[in-house]
Amino acid sequence: MTDRARLLPQLGEVFRAHGYEGASLALISQATALGKGSLYHFFPGGKQQMAAEVLAEIDAWFEHNIFAPLRDDDDPARAIAAMLKGVDSYFRSGNRVCLVGVIALGHARDIFADAVNGYFARWQDALVSALRRTGQSPAMARKRSEDALLTIQGALVLARARDDAAIFTRALADLKARLLA
Amino acid sequence: MTDRARLLPQLGEVFRAHGYEGASLALISQATALGKGSLYHFFPGGKQQMAAEVLAEIDAWFEHNIFAPLRDDDDPARAIAAMLKGVDSYFRSGNRVCLVGVIALGHARDIFADAVNGYFARWQDALVSALRRTGQSPAMARKRSEDALLTIQGALVLARARDDAAIFTRALADLKARLLA
DNA sequence: GAGACACTGTACCGATCGGTACAGAGAGTC
DNA sequence: GACTCTCTGTACCGATCGGTACAGTGTCTC
């Protein structure tokens, strides 16, 4: 189990760098320093199981570090600030790409549609909850939470496209002001 | 030449749907109803040349329909409104994905880095030009143009991730109000 | 009709794909 | 030492990958 815990982040980076289709078993084997025998011992379901477990781990990380505080923190403004800080840290200030977004844009979305949709749906719902507790109307909370998610995704795309991570940092700063206006 | 003009959009849809790595010659051959012989007759450089020419055609379309009006229109507000209308139409109200963004997120970005960066750089510069002519400060124009590009990209990602094209339409409407505020 | 030319289908190339089979290696138990 | 069980490397599978070779095919020119 602890082996798997060390494996999943490595798999995640391979999928991030090459996408689902582009992450060949040879690349995965190289990144993990594990032969196919070991790989298929841990993941009998092959590549699809690897990606599914990586997505589940990412989801669990966000659930614990981002979504739950947004839903439960007594101080919603603090939870929102913590979300932005956590997001900045998770995406390495714009130098790391969102695997869920990468999969959403690719052909693999069909396979992982539920995981992809659920991730963003729960994020948005949690953010709506926090925004409502700051006193915003349901409509305003919903609109701003949608704005927040697409801003983060768009900033990651643009930062990578222009090879300028500062775009992401600026977008997060603007977003903070917009969310709590 | 006219054959090639009919070919490039078909190639574009294959790359959009499967990404650069995922677009196999078999898929391309099927989508274009052309055998490998014909494909390599038109594109001796293979898949890479196909993608490069598709990107160039996309760039030319935006240059003519979006960027040039933003730079040259006597009425900058009208050009910005036309940009949003053109973008909505080009991306089929959120049902079509941005090929430049798809490539930017994938491993193929390394090959097409200049084309990808140039596309967004010229878009932003053109939008800055229009915003400045509406009387906005250089700093404000630059910030809002960056916001515009990442909003469009993020809305496309989120719309596809959640399988809800309305996200894109809403984002464009909000963006319009924000740009001309 | 002869020749040139742009285009096309098919067979084929070596490499790599995801996945399987299997014989161990190593550690723990009795 | 014998057995079990988890883990590992390697050889191998058929399929597909991007790309090449080449013999046509039709059309147009002279």
Image (cartoon, coloured by chain):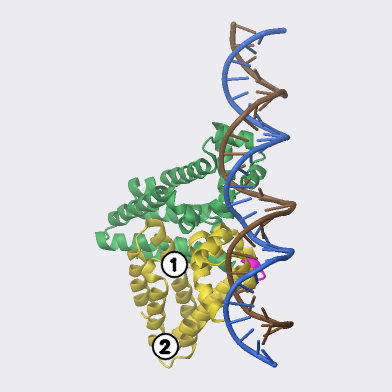
Chain colours: A green, B yellow, C brown, D blue
The correct choice, above or below, for B85 with respect to A108 in the image is below
Q: Chain of mark 2?
A: B
Residue at image location 55% in from the left, 41% down from the top? A8
Badge 1 and badge 2 in a common chain: no
According to the picture, the residue beneath numbered tag 2 turns out to be B76
Q: Chain of mark 1?
A: A
A142 horizontally vs B144: left or right:
left
Question: Observer-nearest residue: B137 or C12?
Answer: C12
In the image, the segment drawn in magenta is B44-48
Instruction: Decide if residue A16 is in sight here.
Output: no
Q: Residues within 10 Å of mark 1 (few under 14, many from 20)?
A: some
The correct choice, above or below, for A169 with respect to B75 in the image is above
The location of residue A49, given as percent across then percent down, is 50, 40
Residue at image location 50% in from the left, 80% down from the top? B61
Q: Amino acid at mark 2?
A: Pro
Q: Main secondary structure of the magenta part?
A: helix
The location of residue B102, given as percent across then percent down, is 52, 63
Q: Amino acid at mark 1?
A: Asp
